[in-house]
Structures are given as structure tokens and as C-alpha cells.
Amino acid sequence: MRLIVTSLLFGLSGALTPALAADALELQPLTIDYQVSRGGKVLGSARRHLEPADGDTWRLTMSSELEAFLVRDKRDESSLFRWRNQAPQPLEYRYLTESSFKGERLIEQHFDWQRKMETGKRTDKDRTWELPLPDNAVDRLSASLAIRQALTAGRESGTLQVSYRGRVREFHFQKLGQETLTTPAGSFETDKVSFRESGDEDITYYWFARGARNLLLQISDSDEGDGFLISAARVDPAL
């Protein structure tokens, strides 16, 4: 069973020119609850939460729990980052999955910006790594904040760098247009964005609320509405 919740809010950052202050995204604490479905059948739920942490850092978390047929899938992600030059600078990333047939898997990444090196491990593969970091690299969870900033600054496309599983991957995003979106949380005016890894034909579609906050309200792996759909069910504070 393909679960696109594994890439929910997957990296959207990278070579983005810092915006002027008037076009800057202001981080605020928030919670978004999502409904996850496929073909109209609800499979479970997900929650995204952003809050300030110690000093000048922020913590972003994402959790989900899905069930289909005999498969139960639970995932928890967290990213500790600084907000520098209108982009997230990751410090720690953690991704824990528990599945009915695959057991438990843990991925951890630590970012040392003085050395410009990342160290990480993946428990199910008994694998560790160390790799050099590009100046604009982000982890896959905090990265969505960068595309929110890009939209705030009027950017419609960009090339992105996302560090995950011991490799820095290049992605491209493109604003496709504006769309009135109806979700369980209500109807919103949104910017629709496509997202694709270099060399990969698979495309993920994102809908961001238009306006100062540019919150991510919906994700799908299909433009026809027949794939997995992750839609906002509650936004706090409300739009």
C-alpha cells in the first residue's frame, strides 16, 4: 500500500533567494489536523504542529495513523530548526515508523553547520552516514516552510535541496495556478503547486492557502482525484 503520508510536507526548500522584509513569512504557532483518504474512503488522520522551542529554534512535528484492510501504519516525524534568512536551517530530524508487517524503523539526522556536515542513522538497515551539507540544505519536514516563504515572496518556481536517508536530493516546484479548494475544514482560495524530484516522473500536488500565512491545506499524488488525498480538517488558529 503506497502511503503518501510518508512524504507529507516533504521537502520544499533550497535555492531560494531571501525575500525582502515586506515579503517575509512570519512564523507563528499552528496546528493542522488532516483527513487521509483514497477513492473517497477515509483511511485515517494526520496532524502537523509548529511551536517555538528553546532560544531561537522552532520545532515542527507531523504524526499520522492509517488503517486499510489488515495494514496499520503509524508515523511520527519531528524537525528542530532555526529560521535564518527566511528559510529553515535544520538542526535535528527524527522519523519513526511502525507498520503491521514491516515493524519499526527509525531515521535520525543531525546537522552541524559549523562543520557543514550531517551525520545520520537508519536502524532497519543498520546504516550510518556522514555527508557534506550544501549551504541551503533542509530536512524533508521543515522544508515545506521554505515554499510557503517562496509563495509569500511571489516566487512561482524553484530548485530545491532536501537531505534524506543519507543523500541530498534535488527537487523542483512549480506554481500551476489558483484554485478554490473545498476540504473538511471549509472552502479556501489556494495556490496549486506541483513537486517532483529530479529524474523522477512521479508528481505530488500541493494546495497552499493564499494570503499572508500560505498554509498547506491539501496534498495528493494524483491530479485526477483518484489517488491518496490529505485534506485539512481543522486549522488552529483558523484562517
Image (cartoon, rainbow, N blue to C red):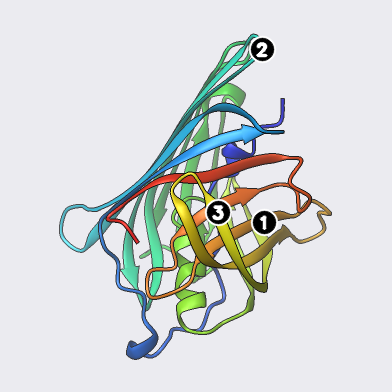
Q: Residues within 10 Å of mark 2 (few under 14, many from 20)?
A: few
- Work out whether 194 lies above or below 224: below
For the residues bearing labels 1 and 3, Cβ distance under 8 angstroms? no
**Label 2 vs 1, first from the N-terminus:** 2
Marks 1 and 3, how far apart at CA: 15 Å
Report which quarter residue 81 is drawn in.
Answer: bottom left
Q: In this view, does 33 lie above or below 200?
A: above
Q: Quadrant of the C terminus?
A: bottom left
Query: Residue 181, can we see it?
Result: yes
Looking at the picture, tell me which residue is in the foreground, 72 or 112: 72
* Residue in the foreground of this view, choosing between 89 and 53: 53
| Amino acid type, residue under disc 1 in the picture | Tyr
Q: How crowded is mark 1: few (under 14 residues within 10 Å), some or many (20 or more)?
A: many
Mark in front: 1 vs 3 = 3
Q: Circle 3 sits in a helix, a strand or a loop, which is it?
A: strand
In the image, 35 versus 205, the foreground residue is 35
Horizontal and vertical percent for residue 78?
38, 42
Q: Is mark 1 on a helix, strand or loop?
A: strand
Task: Find disc 1 in the rendering and name its residue.
Answer: 205
Three-letter amino acid code at the position of disc 3: Thr
First along the sequence among labels 1 and 3: 3
Residue 69: mark in rendering: 2
Residue depicted at x 64% and y 39% = 4
Residue that mark 3 sits on: 182
Element carrying mark 2: loop
